[in-house]
Image (tube, rainbow, N blue to C red):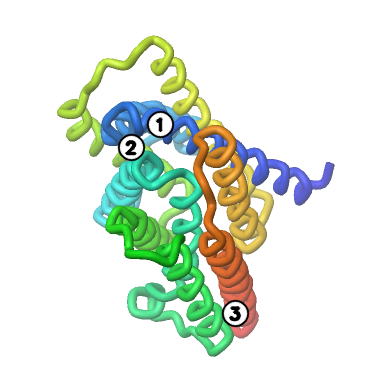
Amino acid sequence: MKPKTQGYIFVLLAITIFSLQDGISKHLGSAYPPVFVTMIRYWAFGLFTILLASKMRGGLMATARTKRPVLQVIRGLLLASQVVAVISCFAVIGLAHSQAIFSATPILIALLSMPLLGERVGWRRWTAICAGLIGVLLILKPDGGMFDYKLLLAILSCFLFAFYVIATRLVSRDDSSMTSFFYTGVVGAAAMTLVGPFYWTWMSAGDWGWMALVCITSISSHYFLIRAYDMLDAAAVQPLTYLQLVYASIIGVTIYNETLSLNTIIGSMIVVASGIFTIWREHVVGRRQATRQ
């Protein structure tokens, strides 16, 4: 099997497992404090990153060596906060509707990359961004009625993840991807350990089983995603992540009896199309700039 084919298989595995993890997280987040659920999940994730880093060349110390320690810590805190917000969204907004809003994140990243990274955006990406924002407005008013203030939580989650991605781009100029991955897990686990015990809640035996499955899916999905990025460019991986919206809609409607309005469906289609074009255009511009250097 060709490496590129293997890469696509790893992407599909990662996305499928991420979606299963989201479905279980909605159940747990509806019954227990999202901060507590995130803490247990990060304990498993943090242990996985430490074990993985110890097997790298130079061991744990070499992997942990960073030129941007403050920014690495900020990255870890941003992602941990975003995970708490995501689980809360699944519980109070719904799986499908939350993922529909989250699908606008690449568009938000393109907007924020201009002032924060100094990137230039041409008329093509501006057109895609404007179209995507129209799609977001449709999603935020699924019934054409009053704005639901609970949706602000999903918007906050988008901003947290967008800032996390931009911070990741900044540290990638000096640190390896494995170093960044290590700090993502360790900093997040440390931060949640400081906060999570205040939200400790005893789970039923059955829910501890679901919690164990969340930990397993968290580790395996990140592992498959790492393998995918080893074999594929980010431009090939990122458009496929929109499959999470499809999976979330299926799980939300069939298992949790969620409903999808026409506004949400149309808005999601606009946002996904705009996001894929934005990702593709960034890749084209990046390759063009690389050939000029």
* Residue positioned most to the left: 198
* Residue kind at label 2, given as amino acid type: Val
Above-or-below relation of 277 to 185: below
Q: Which residue corresponds to mark 1?
A: 50
* Left/right of residue 91 with respect to residue 273 in the rendered view: left
Which one is in front, 52 or 93? 93
Label 2 residue SS: helix
Above-or-below relation of 293 to 166: below
Query: Could you tell me how far apart the alpha carbons at marks 3 and 1 are, in whole angstroms?
Result: 36 Å
Which one is in front, 229 or 241? 241
User: Could you tell me which residue is drawn at 58 percent across and 85 percent down?
Assistant: 124
User: Could you tell me which residue is drawn at 48 percent across and 70 percent down?
Assistant: 107
Is there a contact, CB below 8 Å, between mark 2 and mark 3? Answer: no
Q: Is residue 68 visible?
A: no
Which one is in front, 60 or 58? 60
* Residue kind at label 1, given as amino acid type: Ile
Which one is in front, 46 or 104? 104
Image quarter where the N terminus lies is top right
Q: Is residue 35 visible?
A: yes
